[in-house]
Amino acid sequence: MTLPATARLGEHVSFLSGFAFKSAFFNTEGEGLPIVRIRDVKAGRSDTYYSGEYDPKFIVSDGDYLIGMDGEFSLARWRGGKALLNQRVCKVESVSDRLDAGYLVRFLPSALKAIEDATPFVTVKHLSVKALRDIEIPLPPLAEQRRIAAVLDQVDALRARRRQAAALLADLAGSVFLDMFGGPSDILENWPTRPLGDALDFLTSGSRGWAKYYTDDPRVLFLRIQNVRGGELLLDDIAYVTPPQTKEAERTRVRAGDVLLSITADLGRVAVVPEELGDAHINQHLAILRAPSLNPNFLAEYISSPAGQRQILGRNRQAVKAGLNFDDVRSLRIPVPPRDMQDTFDRRLRETRRTRDAHHVHLARLDELFASLQQRAFTGQLWEHEPAQP
């Protein structure tokens, strides 16, 4: 294997650093031009405007590539229309005829991440234009650069389509719920209603002071507010406990089918405890709603819906204390469609989630493929198994 020749990025790329525009002329009323700050680079648009005088050389347009120079060193393509380049953001201004622009933008993210990871910081990491210019970029022949960029573009397009499909499926549950039961203006008129308390067999919240029971032993989960969202448990940031043998511990143990509701801080998050979860307890920010007469996924989706969230926020006692008390929870007015309709929704929801999860599995594989292709492309290994040309 022969590694491709490299060159300093500064020999082939020029960068334009943003200007320190005076914040006195910033506004959110749409006066002047949008101004691109670090927070706007990845978003590709800005809601902040600048109404003062400016040098036209700091104008950016759709399609320009921008780099955030503080915190996370990110590259993104601007799509927010004519705008102004603020300080600590720079623009890829020009590229030499020996470097393909598509190849450059495929190479830069990993190079920026390497600099970010190697940069010490006290409060915020800073990237200099000099560091950008000193990046060594592999420089195979131009035709090879274009070929590499085309392969990475194709795989990245597949990733984008998978992400879009997964996002649409994530939104589908709410759409199915609205189609079956109604929207915030009419759902409580379409069906018989009752206070949630009348349907509850059990309502409790978690206990304080469980940090002393934390352990690395993964046998018993400790569910916190970050684990609850969108009707499902998120277990990518999970704590474990060795629970005491007390009535308090037994009270806060969850069962399959329980609906968990956040009652302090970020109110109104919900999740349904799945059958396969195993032994788990909740902390003080969560409540267990056990309502066997209601399908738990129906109940969770209603609480997550605009109609349910309106009631949650209307009962928020933020002025007195952060959150909801049990009387607030019991007083929530809930629709009660026939149980077979609730169960039909449950089945459709599960089917949607299975399809979504399959998309996530495929997306993870595409992410791995993309990372592998990037690594091989920029070390001269992408075509090493191709037969030699006669």
Image (cartoon, grey):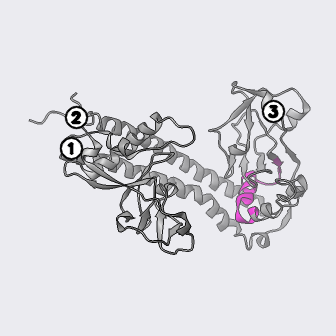
Q: Please state the total of marks drawn on the protein image.
A: 3
Q: Please state which amino acid type lies under the numbered disc 2.
A: Pro
Q: CA distance from mark 2 to mark 1?
A: 10 Å
Neighbor class of circle 2 (other Cα within 10 Å; few <14, some 14-19, many 20+) is some
Q: Which residue is mark 2?
A: 4
Q: Earlier in the sequence, mark 3 or mark 2?
A: 2
Q: Which residue is mark 3?
A: 210
- Residue 224, quarter of picture: top right
Position of 242 relative to 349 (above/below): above
Tell me, yes or no, whether the two marked residues, 2 and 1, touch with CB atoms within 8 Å.
yes
Split into 4 quadrants, where in the image is the C terminus? Answer: top left
Q: Please state which amino acid type lies under the numbered disc 3.
A: Trp
Q: Position of residue 178 (x, y in %)?
A: 66, 66
What SS does tag 1 mark? helix
Q: Which residue is mark 1?
A: 144
Q: Position of residue 233 (x, y in %)?
A: 68, 44
Is residue 129 highlighted in magenta?
no
Position of 286 relative to 91 (above/below): above
Q: Residue drawn 43% across and 59% down? A: 19
Is residue 302 highlighted in magenta?
yes
State the extent of the magenta-drawn residues as a range: 288-309
- In the figure, is residue 45 to the left or right of 304? left
What SS does tag 2 mark? loop
